[in-house]
Structures are given as C-alpha cells and as structure tokens.
Amino acid sequence: MKTRTPKWRRTSPVHYLLLATITFLSIFPFYWMFVVSSNTNAEISKSPPSLIPGGRFFIVAKKVLSAQGVYFNSALLNTFIVGTSIAVAQVLLSAIAGFAFAKLNFKGRKFFILFVVGTMMLPSQLGIIPLFMLVKNLHMIDSLFGLIVPALVTAFGVFWMRQIIDAQIPNELLEAASIDGASVPRIFWSIVMPIVRQSGFVLGLFAFLAAWNDYLWPTIVLQSPKHFTLQVALTQLKPMYGLDYGLQMGGAFLATAPLLILFIFVGRKLVSGVMDGAVKG
C-alpha cells in the first residue's frame, strides 16, 4: 500500500525556486571575491564588470602570502591556535558550569543562572575598556593569551550547555550512577559528556567561527605584525599607492576558504548537533 506524503512535506517548483535563490545569494559573495581576485582592476572597473574568473588568482595568492609586513602565514596559524584553544576551552568549561547549574543543588543556583543570562543582554562593547585594563595588568598585551583568556568561557556557552544537559539527561540516570558509587566528576566524564558531545561540538564550532572572524578585540590587543590574526592582517594588505582590489579580495578569499572547507567536512555534524538538542529538548 502506497503511503501518502504529508501535506507539509510536499515540494513544489516555488520551493525549489526559493532554495535556489537563497543558495545563489549565499554563494555569490564568495564567488565575487574569487572573480575580483583573479582579474585586473581594469576588468573589474568596466561597466558592467566582468563576472567570469580571470587567470591571475595564483599570482595574487602568491602576492598575498609574500606581502611585506603582513605575515599572512603566521596570521593563519595564529588564528587557528586562538580559535582551537577557545573552542576546546568553551566546550569543557561551559559543560562543567552547565552541568552544575542543571543537575547539582547548591545555594544561590537560580540567582547565579539568572545573573549569567542577564549578562547576555549587555553589549560586549561596554566591557572593552575594563577588559583591556585587566589584560594589560596581566601583561597579556600583544600576546595570543590576550585573545584566548578573555574568551575561555561565555554566558551563552554556559546557558546553552545548561539547557542541553537539563533536557537530555534524566535525573534518574544520574541518581542510579550515584547509587552505584560514581563520584560527581566520574558522572560528568562518563555519562554527561558522551551524551552531550554533539551539542558540545556545535558550541565549539560556533566559538571557533567567532574567534576566526573577530576583528575588534585583536585590533586592540595585538601590536606586533607577527602576532596578528587573519582579520587584522587583512587590513595590512594594501599597496603603497592606489588601490589593488585583487590583492585585498584575494586575501579575503584565502581567509574565508578554510571555513568553507571546514563546513564541507562538519556541516552534516553541525546540523545533526543542532537538531539533536532541538528534538530531544
């Protein structure tokens, strides 16, 4: 017997047209960066401009990687180190705090979680001056530690993991483990973390992307070109005279390409992690 497809799951040409439009609008900026970086200024300045990639991309990429005073390779490595460190730290520390807020009973628990959530409503720009003073007193100016330490844990990460742990892990499971003699750290490592690893991966990926794309705070903290992250290094890609659109767009393309490659490999896992928390919650 043939099963009828539910009405809400049926597709139509309108759906495909909408998806095609959204896909085009999402991909076109990246394609345009590649077109500009592979053509000369004259070809880009034509009216209408050329929409076909040229043959200069590898020449431009070589200029980006060897640009004097930019240290693009070092910036790429620095950004990867900062992003990975922040991602791992946020997943671990947010999971610990989220587990405490969700499953442990201690005095002031409700007040502290409300306080954590309340800090999410404050613009991050308000904390730049006191945070800079703190980092300066800790002698972390012009150091990657000045980028990593302030982002080790965030209110969003704690709230995210608290909600996931509270929704996915039943109290009965933890009580059974406790009766069997498991300590709180053992319960956390052996029961909680394996269950929420998908959601933790999503949080880590968000943290990595935020660190990779951050511009304001690295601009304030970093001073030496050898310590620059990608977003800061990109601002140094400019010739002494005139404008070189290909050079700047080539740098932007090379800075964005690793994120697209990353998404190709982890995109399915990202969607799975988001839906895992949404469905089970």
Image: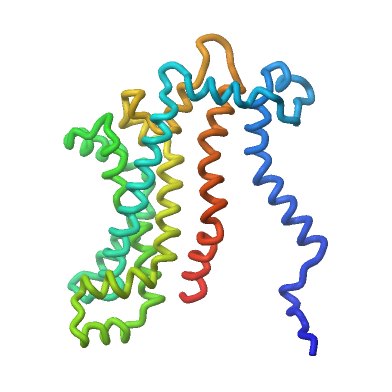
Residue depicted at 51% across the width and 48% down the height: 262
Above-or-below relation of 4 to 87: below
Q: Quadrant of the N terminus?
A: bottom right
In this image, 102 relative to 229: left or right? Answer: left
Colour convention: rainbow
Residue depicted at 38% across the width and 72% down the height: 195
Above-or-below relation of 38 to 15: above
Residue depicted at 66% across the width and 27% down the height: 36
Above-or-below relation of 130 to 263: above
Viewer-closest of 228 and 72 = 72
Residue depicted at 37% across the width and 29% down the height: 228
Q: Quadrant of residue 92?
A: bottom left
Q: Quadrant of residue 232?
A: top left
Q: Quadrant of residue 106?
A: bottom left
Viewer-closest of 280 and 133 = 280
Q: How far across and down, in percent of the image, does residue 45 sit?
A: 72, 19
In this image, 239 relative to 179: left or right? Answer: right
Q: How far across and down, in percent of the image, does residue 74 sit?
A: 39, 29
Q: How far across and down, in percent of the image, does residue 7 sit?
A: 75, 77
Q: Residue furthest right?
A: 13
Q: How far across and down, in percent of the image, does residue 260 sit?
A: 56, 45
- Say how many tags the image has: 0
In this image, 279 relative to 146: left or right? Answer: right
